[in-house]
């Protein structure tokens, strides 16, 4: 099938067509021709007023639920949500029951025929219990792009040491969630003025920072590739910056909600804003924004985490952590960055997971995100395609809207 994108404004800094309006002809999953005007008999025409196109968007931390939590989200519908949100590639966490800690679990995900590309992570330890390392090499051979006990710290320092050493033999990424549970205990929100005034157990900044400090010391000893997902404090940023300056192979990410909101959102005990790591102070939020712009923070993720209503819409102590974010990613980033910066953020990071990137040029595989800049609108449940509706972004004003993707021969348009 031939596809023509008509009068699409190209936003791709590495493309010679960047900033220009072009017709793009796609055939057999590849970009065949780019020109001001293209006619092709029997081609499917995508002609949308104000259409923009970039190389495919990438999210490094997404959860669905299947297997085990299908009431939250299935892999098939989750992939469709990602596609309608403009993402051609997402990294899928082992946030399932049972945890994806074996070759069979990775093959289960890889066997799915989906609208976008799903790149599974394997759990670093068996059942993500930080007691025994999982079969990393087998999962790597099955298609795992890295190893991560989702939102669970590696409390056994020797396991982190061994996994960083072992993974170098097959060039894999080890991820370590930054939280010292012995300090955090049963904390619910950021430890600070709000937690004290409202009598809610707090998660102190240094419960994150002390874990990062430990991990960086281990990395300096072992070598290897370490990724620290979803940092939330200024001090964490400073520690990673210094480690990079020393030449350590460390990368990090931040969740979009930690760039957008601060702890004041918890004043009304709205559990949509109960996330892990928690929303921190305005000082931390501004430091994280600077970290993204300077490049110290390598990735920005939606940290999409569907939670069913029974486990989310309850009291602040018992509500599960997490917010969905795929549908609101583009609009919320555009509230913080320029369009060019936003697209760079949404398209970078594949290299960390050994995933190929495709620019907009003739002969390249068609891995494209479609979007437009609209008049300001309010993000509402009408924009949510996920099975779970636990979005922290409901009611936020936005001006960027994803249309869908062209992913090889797959076309998904957001109705």
Image: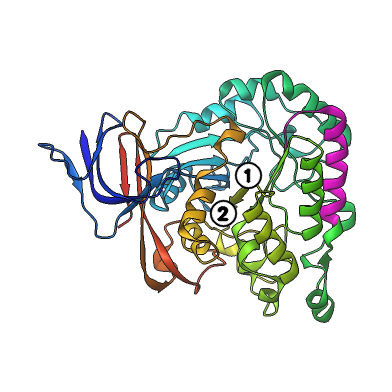
Q: How far is mark 1 from mark 2, CA to CA?
A: 15 Å
Residue 284 to residue 153: above or below: below
Q: Secondary structure at mark 2?
A: loop
In the picture of the structure, the residue carrying the numbered disc 1 is: 95
Point 62% across, 35% down: residue: 352
User: Tags 1 and 2 in contact by the CB under 8 Å rule?
Assistant: no
Q: Nearer the viewer, residue 307 or 344?
A: 344
Point 88% across, 51% down: residue: 210
Horizontal and vertical percent position of residue 123: 68, 35
Q: Secondary structure at mark 1?
A: loop
| Residue 32 falls in image quadrant | top left
Q: Which residues are magenta?
A: 207-226
Q: Nearer the viewer, residue 280 or 130?
A: 280
Q: Residue furthest front?
A: 16
Point 45% across, 40% down: residue: 14
Horizontal and vertical percent position of residue 15: 40, 40
In the picture of the structure, the residue carrying the numbered disc 2 is: 302
Dominant secondary structure (helix, strand or loop) of the stretch shown in magenta: helix
Using residue 329 as the reference point, say whether residue 252 is left or right of it: right
């Amino acid at each position: 099938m031939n596809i023509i994108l008509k009068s699409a404004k190209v936003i791709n800094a590495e493309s010679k067509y960047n900033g220009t309006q072009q017709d793009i002809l796609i055939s057999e999953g590849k970009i065949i021709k780019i020109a001001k005007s293209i006619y092709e008999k029997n081609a499917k025409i995508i002609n949308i007023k104000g259409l923009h196109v970039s190389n495919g968007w990438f999210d490094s931390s997404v959860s669905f639920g299947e297997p085990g939590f299908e009431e939250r989200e299935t892999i098939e519908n989750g992939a469709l949500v990602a596609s309608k949100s403009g993402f051609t590639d997402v990294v899928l966490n082992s946030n399932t029951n049972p945890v994806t800690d074996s070759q069979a679990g990775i093959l289960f995900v890889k066997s799915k025929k989906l609208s976008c590309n799903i790149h599974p992570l394997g759990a670093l330890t068996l059942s993500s219990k930080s007691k025994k390392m999982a079969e990393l090499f087998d999962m790597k051979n099955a298609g795992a792009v890295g190893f991560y006990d989702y939102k669970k710290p590696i409390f056994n320092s020797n396991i982190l040491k061994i996994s960083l050493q072992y993974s170098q033999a097959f060039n894999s990424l080890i991820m370590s969630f930054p939280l010292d549970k012995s300090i955090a205990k049963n904390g619910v929100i950021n430890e600070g003025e709000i937690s004290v005034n409202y009598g809610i157990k707090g998660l102190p900044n240094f419960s994150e920072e002390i874990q990062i400090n430990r991990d960086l010391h281990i990395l300096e000893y072992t070598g290897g590739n370490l990724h620290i997902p979803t940092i939330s404090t200024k001090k964490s940023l400073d520690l990673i910056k210094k480690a990079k300056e020393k030449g350590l192979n460390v990368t990090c990410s931040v969740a979009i909600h930690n760039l957008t909101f601060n702890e004041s959102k918890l004043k009304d005990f709205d559990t949509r804003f109960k996330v892990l790591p928690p929303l921190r102070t305005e000082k931390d939020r501004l430091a994280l924004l600077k970290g993204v712009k300077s490049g110290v923070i390598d990735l920005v993720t939606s940290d999409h985490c569907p939670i069913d209503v029974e486990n989310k819409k309850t009291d602040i102590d018992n509500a599960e952590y997490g917010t969905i974010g795929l549908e609101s990613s583009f609009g919320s980033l555009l509230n913080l960055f320029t369009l060019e910066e936003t697209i760079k953020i949404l398209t970078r990071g594949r290299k960390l997971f050994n995933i190929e990137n495709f620019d907009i040029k003739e002969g390249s595989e068609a891995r494209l995100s479609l979007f437009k800049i609209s008049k300001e609108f309010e993000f509402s449940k009408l924009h949510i395609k996920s099975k779970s509706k636990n979005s922290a972004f409901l009611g936020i004003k936005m001006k960027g809207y994803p249309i869908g993707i062209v992913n090889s021969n797959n076309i998904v348009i957001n109705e």
